[in-house]
Amino acid sequence: MARQTWKPGNMLYPVPAVMVSCQRPGEKPNIITIAWAGTTNSDKPMVSISIRPERYSYDIIKETGEFVINLTTKDLVYATDYCGVKSGRNIDKFKEMNLTPNPSVAVSCPGIAESPVNIECKVTQIVPLGSHDLFLAEVVQVTVDEKYMDKSGKFHLNDLGLVAYSHGEYFLLGEKLGKFGYSVKK
C-alpha cells in the first residue's frame, strides 16, 4: 500500500464543533466557534478549549475565567460557522444570528438557549502552546433542554443531531456503529 509522508500537522478529525459563549461584566455577550475542545478529566469533570490569543474572545475568557460550551446541532450549523468567521469586536453575534442568551446557573456569562446542552465552565489553568493557548476548565454546571428527555428522565444526547467538524467541513452525526464494550461482550 503506497503512503505519502507529510509534515507534522493536526489531522485528528472529526472534532466537536461547539459555540463557546463568554461575557465581560457590563458588556454584550460574545460567541466564538471552537473545534479544538475536549474532555480532559471525569472526576472532577474538566474540559479544554484552545484559542488563538488574537481572537476577541480570548481576552474575555482570560479576564473573566468563565465560559459556556454550547453543543451544536444541524439547526445551529449556520450560526456555528458564522460565529467562527465573524469577530465580536464588530458585531453582536447573538443578535445577528437570532440566538437567545440563556442565563447560566454557576457562571456570569450566558449560554445559548437554542443549544440543547450548555456546559458552564471555570478556567483553572491557561497553558501557552504557540499558535493557541489551552484553557483547562472545571465543569461547574450543565443544563439541558428538557424536550430531549423521556418520561423516565433519561436524556437522549445521541438524538440531538450533533455536529462534528472535519478538515474544514461540518458533518451531522447519526449512524450508531456500536456500543462501548460491544467488541468483548459475550
Image (cartoon, helix red, strand yellow):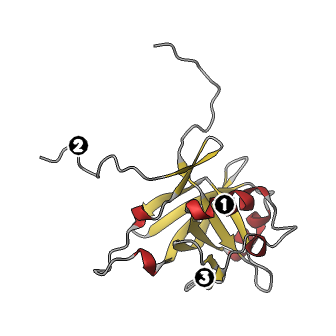
Q: Nearer the viewer, mark 1 or mark 2?
A: 1
Q: Which residue is mark 2?
A: 183
Q: Which residue is mark 3?
A: 107
Q: Which residue is mark 1?
A: 80
- Disc 3 vs disc 1: Cβ atoms closer than 8 Å? no
Which of the 4 quarters of the picture holds residue 115?
bottom right
Given residues 49 and 103, the one toward you in this image is 103
Instruction: Report how far apart the C-alphas of labels 3 and 1 lie in the structure.
Output: 22 Å
The disc labelled 1 sits on which kind of residue?
Answer: Thr
Instruction: Report how far apart the C-alphas of labels 1 and 2 lie in the structure.
Output: 35 Å
Q: Is residue 15 visible?
A: yes
Coordinates of residue 135 in the picture (x, y in percent): 62, 61
Given residues 152 and 61, the one toward you in this image is 152
Q: Secondary structure at mark 1?
A: helix
Q: Looking at the picture, does residue 144 appear above or below residue 9?
A: below
Q: Mark 2 or mark 3: which comes first in sequence?
A: 3
